[in-house]
Every structure is written in C-alpha cells, then in structure tokens.
Image: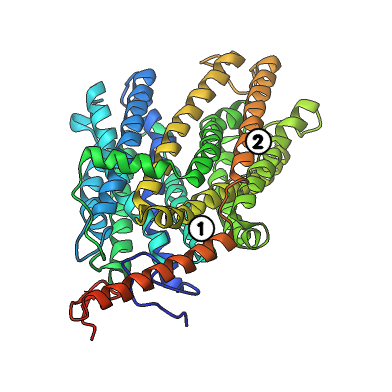
Amino acid sequence: MPQRHARMSTGVGIISGKLPMRLKLIQGFGAVAFGVKDNGFSFFLLIFYNQVLGMDAALVSFALLIALLVDAVVDPILGNLSDRTYTRWGRRLPWLYAAPIPLAFAWVMMWSPPAGEAPSFGGLVAIAIAVRVLLSACEVPSISLVPELTADYDERTTLFRYRALGGWIGGLGMMILAYTVFMPGPEGLLQREGYFAFGIFGAVLMAVSVIGSAVGQHKLVAHLPATKPAPFTITGAFAEIREAFSERAFLIFAVGGLAAYVHQGLNFSITNYINLFVLQLTRGQMMFFPLVLLGAVVLMFVLIAPLHQRLGKAKTAGFGMIVGTVLGMVPYTLLLLGIWPSPGTTASAALFFGFAMIATALGIISLVSATSMIAEIVEAFEERTGRRAEGSFYSGNWLVQKCATGAGIFLSGQIIAFSQLAPDAVPGSVPQGVLTSLLLSYGGAMLVLAVISAWWLARFPITREEHEARINRLAERRARTTRDAVRAAPDAPILATDGMPSPHK
C-alpha cells in the first residue's frame, strides 16, 4: 500500500510514493469533459452550423476564432482566481462543483439553438465563449491539482497520462457514438435530430466527469489553505501572471510548446483533407480511424513511463516530436515516390493506419511530457518567490495552446489555398500537381515546426535530479518556518499539515 503524507496545504505533495490506482482513474475521469468539448469543436461544430443550420462557413469559423481568442485571454485570469480561492474546500474544489452544471446547459444550447434555426453571428460567438470559458473553469482547477497531489517526478507524469487517456476516450467515444448511434442514417452528419441527442449526452457526460472527479478527490484535497492570499484585483492578477511568465523554464517551455501546438493544430485541421483527397479513404475505412487514434493513446500509455525513466521528460518530448513527425510523413513520401499502394485500396488504408497509430502515439507522448514539465516549474517559482501558482502556469499553457491551435488552423487554410485545391473537389479527380503541392507544403511545415519544438523542449532546464533536490530544499525551508513560528509564539495555534489549527506546546 502506498504511504501517505498528512494533507499539506503548502504544496509539497499530499501523497508520497506510488499513487493509488483509484486516484489515477479519478484524475483521468475528470479530463473526459475536455475531450468531449475538444471533439465537438474540432470535428462537428463547423459542419453542424454550416451544412445543417445553413450559416456561412466563413462566419462560423470567424465566430469560433473570436471565442478561442477571448477564452485564451480569460484563462490566465481564471488560473489566478483559482490560485487565490480560499475556502475550507481548498482552492480548486469550489470551481469543480460550481462550473459543470452551467457548462452542461451551455453545451445543450450550442447543439439545439432556439427554434431549431441558426443563431445570429453574435449569438454563436456568445454561446461559444460561454462553453469555452466554463470548460476552462473546470479544466484549469482540475489540472492544477496534479502538482498539489504529488511532488514525485514520475507520478506526476502518471497522472497526466491518465488525464490524456480520459480526454481521448471522451472525445473518441463521442465521435464513435456520433457515427453509430446519434447520426447513423443515410444523411449521416447532416441529420439534424442527431445533434440534439449528441448535445444532451455530451452535457451529461461532462457534468458527471468533472463533479465525479471532484467528489472522488474531496476528502484528499478539501482543506483550508495554509495562507490567505491577497484579494483578487485585475492589476494584481496580471502582475502575478507576468511574474509567473517570466520564469525562465516556463519561457523555454512556451516557445517549444507554441511550435508543438501549431504543429498539432495544423495536423488535426488538415487530416480530413489528406484522408479524403490524398489517401481517398472510403466511408467504411474512415470508421476505423477513431479506433486507430484510440490505439495510439493506449500505445502512449504503455511507452511514456519507460521513456521518461530512460530519457527524462524533456528529451522524451523532443524525441516524440521528431520521430513521430518523420514516421507520419513516410506514407506521403512513399506515395510521391510511386512506391505506395493505390489510394483507396485496403492495403493503402491498412499501412496508413499503422504509421498513423505510431506517429500519433509519439506526438501525444511529446505533448503529455511537455504538460508534465510544467508541474516542475511550480516548485521553481515557489523557491524563487515563496508562492505557488499552479493555476497561473497551467492557464498560461492553455493560453499558448489555444493561440497556437488557431495559428495551426490558419496555416492549414493557407496551405490548402496555396495548393489550389478547388472548393468542390471530388476525391479521385484532383490533379496530381495539386496533391503534390499540398503534401510538400504540409510535410515541410510539419517538419520545420517539429524541429523548432524539439530543439526548445529538449533544452528544458529542470531535470529529475534538480527537481528532487529542490523538493528537499523547500521541505527544509517549511520546517524552519514552522520551528521559527513555534519559538516566536509557543502557545499560538499554527496550521498542521492538514491545514487545520493544531496546538503546539
């Protein structure tokens, strides 16, 4: 059985040693909501509002971009508010109980607009912002719990891989249900009634995910923080955010992460074009694609811990980015060289799925490793300033991710325009010159972004040894602070390790 520390409000980690499986599953379950949202926005929202409700595609895309940028700006403020929350339930739990229900209602409204008609441009912007901000109010506090739960270098990665697993299962599960349960008829994704059920089921799943995860961790993390933070002000919030962003390790992560997220945004947004016009996957073959992605997540889950043991987080992030990108480009390279099976055949689809599974697994390994690296920045910042700012750092990560994802989507649009792919193109009839231009532009951009990302992420300055030494120094500092407080006021109550007053004699 794992040994447990008493609950500590100062942030050295509630649990030492191996984490119990129950906690890993509960943490991972909390990320299901993010997967549901991400899948809906990435794969279904544009076609629903454009092809089903009849809104102009350019307006829908612009509305979603506005919502993304507003959310990116709001995220650091939410992170700072989370860091400053001071209740007997701790800093994070009040958010995880308050935000999911309004999030669920907003999600239902997004997929079933009033009167069944397309909303105005402003109405779509408003509901998209509401969903994104409320989801951030769940995700930022939830992910910020990770460095509070454990200070162990490897166990933090364990929690992040369970979160990645939960997020991907939530997203891929909704994708499979959309194809097989909610919209299975001949109209497929154009079946309006299916989106209502899609919205209802997704809303319930998101609320159950966040609240269930919070309930599962309640006894462990519900305690009064050791120190009461200063009241929230906009000026103070941005000053603290600027200070957090000035941490050298975070800046190095941010540059590498920015390139990695642009890389991911480009890859996700152009995938359907590649599958449809280049590889010419049939409808039956496309049904296997979610299972390929699920296989990639399982492969990540198995490989990431041994890679971290051997290479460390930073080098694993760089390795996954470079090798995954190269492997992902192999099918297109062989296709251009004329030594790939004919597009649309079973052999072509099977080979592509094999390469895609391994390449996607390595890409996820890179991003999970980078996300786990942020947890070590928390203690570096605490050692320098005396404060912990998990929410600020993880909301900063979302700021980088969301801006970069938007840039990736924009870049994919430029590549498609540069290749001169016609809007009414038919698979199998696109000129070879257009496909060659598309693949060379896409592959070149992906390789350049991968090199930039890997170069920076591999230079992340906090190693396992440095992190463990810092944890020991912080523990010694806290012990000295406690001893000094006892000597200064021997009869006064001080905060025990569970955050509750405890008399010292």
Residue name at image x 30 percent, y 51 percent: 138
Mark 1 → mark 2, Cα distance in angstroms:
24 Å
The residue to which callout 2 is attached is 451
**Residue 180 sits above or below residue 387 on the image:** above
Where residue 34 appears, as percent x and y from the top left, is: 38, 48
Q: Nearer the viewer, mark 1 or mark 2?
A: 2
Q: What's the coloring here? A: rainbow
Give the left or right position of residue 417, taking residue 388 as reference: right
Q: Position of residue 81 (x, y in %)?
A: 25, 48
Q: Is residue 377 above or below residue 429?
A: below
Q: Quadrant of residue 228?
A: bottom left
Q: Residue at x 59, y 13 (%)?
A: 420
Quick one: label 1 or label 2, which is nearer the N terminus? Answer: 1
- Badge 2 amino acid: Val
Q: Position of residue 227 (x, y in %)?
A: 25, 62
Left or right of 113? Residue 497 is right
Kindly state the secondary structure of the residue where label 2 is placed: helix
Foreground residue, 319 or 47?
319
Give the image quarter of residue 23. Answer: bottom left
Q: Which of the image's four quarters has the C terminus?
A: bottom left
The residue tagged 1 is 161
Q: Residue 343 occupies which quadrant of the picture?
A: top right
Q: Is residue 111 visible?
A: yes
